[in-house]
Amino acid sequence: MRTIISFAIVLLGVPGIVLAIQLHRQNTGIGGPSGYLEIEQPWALDADDPALRDPGVAVLCYHYISPPPTPVHVARVAAAVLLNLPTIDEKHFWSTPLGMFEAHLRWLQENGYETLSAQEVADIMYGRREAPEKAVAITFDDGERSLLDHGLPLLEKYDMKATLFLVTEQVGKKWKGLDMLSWAELAQLQSSGRISIESHSHDMHYKVKSYGGWMRPVFVDRVPDGGDHGSSDVAFVLADLTNSRNSIRENIGREPRWLAWPYGWANDTLDSLCLL
């Protein structure tokens, strides 16, 4: 029995198949117990990492790649971490330094790891192919410029591939301090053969204040798991997912099949909407 360490994503538009978003281990009921775990912002890779020791496929989730740090940047990070000062923005918390990202790819290559697409991971999960002895899936969220400027050249250098989960409404814009790629640049990524572009929603990558003052992703707030929800709530989510899928198809020329829910979690009710 293999333990699959898999994506926080769901399959889009294929009746009867849902890969639920889970960041913890559970019994999935798909061919027996399977483990779901995503390695968020992997800072170091080594053979002793529990996720890499498990049989199956580890998923390395990146967001942005930052240039080598300057002394000023190091000082700002130290002030934020040690003194809790607002000296760096949110982007820096989700960035992997360029040298560290290259070190990850070099380590994977030197240790004989194969990189897999989302579809290849699904084929393993459903018994359509055997898992390689050593395999990882590399993912990026959002669609920020550093993937084109820094990520793609290194993927080419080390003969690896990745999946980009794209927030389609923000293409070509300045968003949360990010310089988002244009459709022409995204098409360049897709045509490279190194990066497959999938959905990270159209415009649902934000949180709203919910019950008790807690902040929740807007789609979770609109469609609670197992709760009553009107047709307008369902329509809100379905319209967004449809817009995202159509945008990728019309601008990139391929039909996306995968969704990574923003913030990495949703619920069973939301997952079921992805099949409609």
Image: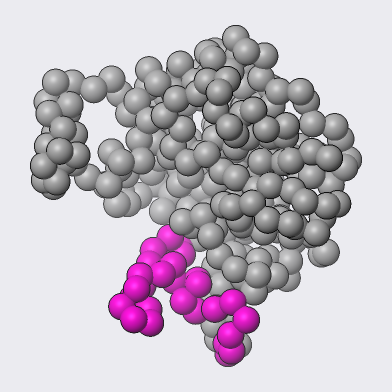
Q: Position of residue 90 (x, y in %)?
A: 27, 47
Residue visible at 50% across and 23% down in the picture: 45
- Whether the magenta-drawn stretch holds residue 16 is answered as no
> Could you say which is closer to the camera, residue 30 or residue 269?
30
Give the residues in magenta.
203-230
- Residue 153 visible here: no
Please indicate whether residue 189 sits to the left or right of residue 170 in the image: right
Depth order, front residue of 217/46: 46
Residue 205 on the magenta span: yes
In the picture, the quarter occupied by the N terminus is top right
Marker count (numbered): 0
Which quadrant of the view contains residue 237? bottom right
How far from the left and from the top, in percent, is residue 275?
73, 66
User: Where 146 falls versus 268 (above or below)?
Assistant: above
The image shows residue 89, relative to residue 15, as above or below, that is: above
The picture quadrant where one finds residue 73 is top left
Quadrant of the rendered structure where residue 101 is?
top left
Q: Position of residue 19 (x, y in %)?
A: 71, 55
Give the x, y percent position of residue 79. Answer: 12, 37
Task: Tell me if residue 189 can be seen.
Answer: yes
Q: Please report the residue visible at 73 percent of the width from the left and 32 percent of the height from the top.
A: 55
Q: Residue at x 60, y 68 (%)?
A: 267
- Which of 72/85 is in front? 85
In the rendered view, tell whether residue 233 sits above or below residue 144: below
Instruction: Locate the C terminus and report the quarter of the image it occupies.
Output: bottom right
- The residue at the point 46 percent across, 32 percent down is 42
Residue farthest right in this picture: 128
